[in-house]
Image (cartoon, helix red, strand yellow):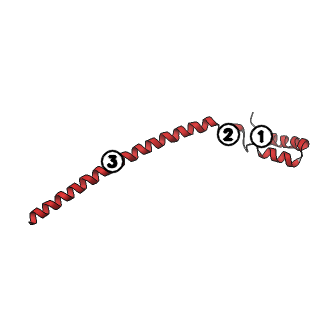
Amino acid sequence: MAITEQNRHQLYTRLEEILGREEATVLMEHLPPVGWADVATRRDLEILETRIEALDARFEARLERGLRELQRNLMFGFLAAQTAFVGVVLAVG
């Protein structure tokens, strides 16, 4: 059953009759602002956590691959620069 604003108002009116205005207001403020079907459950949060962990693992793996590739490229670049420098030194000498 979906809770409508009319249902909420009727509940507040009845609570006000029984408890008084201030107590009825305090109690109503503890209800979710939407129907219960729209409130996340613990299971929803667990599923979300699992998905975030999977995304995190994929991101870390991708980052690690990228860093390894960058390291390899830098190493070959420095090696090529050193080889060229040695070649120039030998050519001049």
Quadrant of the frame with the N terminus: top right
Amino acid on which the number 1 mark rests in the picture? Thr
Amino acid on which the number 2 mark rests in the picture? Asp
Q: Residue at 71% across / 38% down in the picture?
A: 36
Tell us which disc is closer to us: 1 or 3: 3
Q: Is residue 2 above or below residue 76?
A: above
Task: Classify residue 20 as left or right of residue 40.
Answer: right
Report the residue marked by disc 1: 4
In percent of width and height, residue 80 lies at 20, 56
Task: Classify residue 44 as left or right of residue 34.
Answer: left
**Dot 1 crowding, Cα within 10 Å, few <14, some 14–19, many 20+:** few
**Dot 2 crowding, Cα within 10 Å, few <14, some 14–19, many 20+:** few
Tell us which disc is closer to us: 3 or 2: 3
As measured in the structure, the alpha-carbon distance from the residue carrying label 1 to the one carrying label 3 is 57 Å
Report the residue marked by disc 3: 68
Q: Secondary structure at mark 3?
A: helix
Picture disc at residue 38: 2
Quadrant of the frame with the C terminus: bottom left
Amino acid on which the number 3 mark rests in the picture? Arg
Tell us which disc is closer to us: 2 or 1: 2
Of marks 3 and 2, which one's residue comes earlier in the chain? 2
Q: Residue at 48% across / 39% down in the picture?
A: 54
